[in-house]
C-alpha cells in the first residue's frame, strides 16, 4: 500500500521513493507519494519523476486500489529509486481554493442555512453547490464580504483524524457531512478552521489546505446558476498572491 504523504506533508513538494509496480506502460505505483490523486472535488497534482538523468512527466494521478501515477515517455523500471517533484504553483492554488471552499460552506450554512451538496475546484476558479432556492445579487455580495472578512481574520487551519463513532458523537453533523462518506470508512480526517475551543468549521475532508485563512487571498464571487429544483451553484475566483 502506497504511503499517502500528501495528507500530512501538504507543503512537501519533493520526495524520494522506490517504484513498486508498473501497470501497463504508463501507470507507476510508488512506495510512498506526495502527489495528490484526483478526489473530493480536488484535481490531481502534476510534476515529474526522475532518476539517473532520466525524467518522466506525471500528467495524472488516480486512486483506485492503489495510487497510480500516469507518466509520459515510458516508465521507470520496478525497483528504481526516483525523485518526485510536484508542480508547486498548481498544488498551492488547489490548497487555497479548497480552504476557500470550506469557508464558503461555512458562510452559506451560517448566513443562509444552505447545506453544501457538492463542489469542484481548479487552479484558477471553483464552484460549490448547495441546497437553496435562489441567491440574488445582494446575497452574493453578502457571501463575498463575509468570506473576505474571514480571510482577513487569518484564522488557523488544522487537520486531524478521529474514530468515526467519536466524530459522529461529538461534531456537528451539518458541518462535517459525515453521512456522505461510505459506512466502510471508520477513521475520518477532519479539517478545522478557527480556534479549537469554538471552531468556525469542522469538515470531513481528505484534501490539502493552507495553514491559515489569510493565505487564501481576496475572494471574488463571480456568479451563480440554478442547479435543479431548490439547488444553487456559487462560483468564485481568488486573486493571485505571491508565494
Image (cartoon, rainbow, N blue to C red):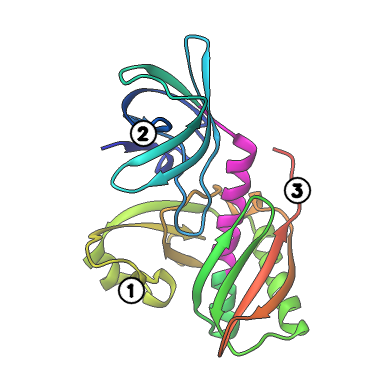
Estimate the x, y position of residue 234 in percent, counting from the top left: 65, 73
Asked if labels 3 and 1 touch by Cβ distance under 8 angstroms, the answer is no
Give the foreground label among 2 and 3: 2
* Vertical side of 62 occupied by 191: above or below: below
* Vertical side of 210 occupied by 21: above or below: above
Q: Residue at x 55, y 71 (%)?
A: 105
Q: Main secondary structure of the magenta part?
A: helix
Specify which label sits upstream in the sequence, 2 or 3.
Answer: 2
Distance from Cα at disc 2 to Cα at disc 1: 36 Å
Estimate the x, y position of residue 17 in percent, counting from the top left: 37, 23
Distance from Cα at disc 1 to Cα at disc 3: 35 Å
Residue located beneath label 2 in the image: 24
Residue located beneath label 3 in the image: 240
Where does the C terminus fall, quadrant-wise? top right
Any part of residue 155 in sight: no
Q: Secondary structure at mark 3?
A: loop
Residue located beneath label 1 in the image: 179
Q: In the shown orientation, is residue 215 left or right of residue 222? A: left
Amino acid at each position: 500500500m502506497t504511503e499517502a504523504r500528501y495528507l500530512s506533508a501538504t507543503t512537501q513538494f519533493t520526495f524520494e521513493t522506490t517504484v513498486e509496480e508498473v501497470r501497463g506502460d504508463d501507470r507507476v505505483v510508488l512506495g510512498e507519494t506526495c502527489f495528490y490523486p484526483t478526489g473530493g472535488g480536488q484535481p490531481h497534482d502534476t510534476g515529474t519523476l526522475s532518476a539517473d538523468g532520466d525524467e518522466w512527466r506525471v500528467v495524472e494521478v488516480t486512486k483506485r486500489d492503489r495510487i497510480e501515477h500516469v507518466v509520459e515517455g515510458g516508465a521507470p523500471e520496478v525497483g528504481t529509486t526516483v525523485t518526485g517533484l510536484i508542480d508547486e504553483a498548481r498544488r498551492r492554488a488547489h490548497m487555497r481554493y479548497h480552504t476557500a471552499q470550506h469557508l464558503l460552506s461555512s458562510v452559506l450554512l451560517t448566513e443562509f442555512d444552505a447545506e453544501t451538496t457538492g463542489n469542484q475546484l481548479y487552479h484558477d476558479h471553483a464552484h460549490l453547490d448547495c441546497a437553496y432556492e435562489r441567491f440574488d445579487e445582494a446575497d452574493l455580495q453578502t457571501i463575498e464580504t463575509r468570506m473576505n472578512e474571514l480571510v482577513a481574520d487569518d484564522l488557523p487551519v488544522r487537520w486531524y483524524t478521529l474514530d468515526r463513532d467519536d466524530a459522529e458523537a461529538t461534531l456537528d453533523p451539518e458541518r462535517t457531512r459525515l453521512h456522505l462518506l461510505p459506512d466502510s470508512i471508520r477513521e475520518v480526517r477532519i479539517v478545522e478552521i478557527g480556534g479549537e475551543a469554538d471552531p468556525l468549521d469542522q469538515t470531513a475532508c481528505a484534501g490539502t489546505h493552507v495553514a491559515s485563512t489569510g493565505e487564501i487571498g481576496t475572494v471574488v464571487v463571480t456568479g451563480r446558476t440554478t442547479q435543479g429544483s431548490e439547488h444553487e451553484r456559487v462560483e468564485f475566483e481568488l486573486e493571485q498572491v505571491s508565494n
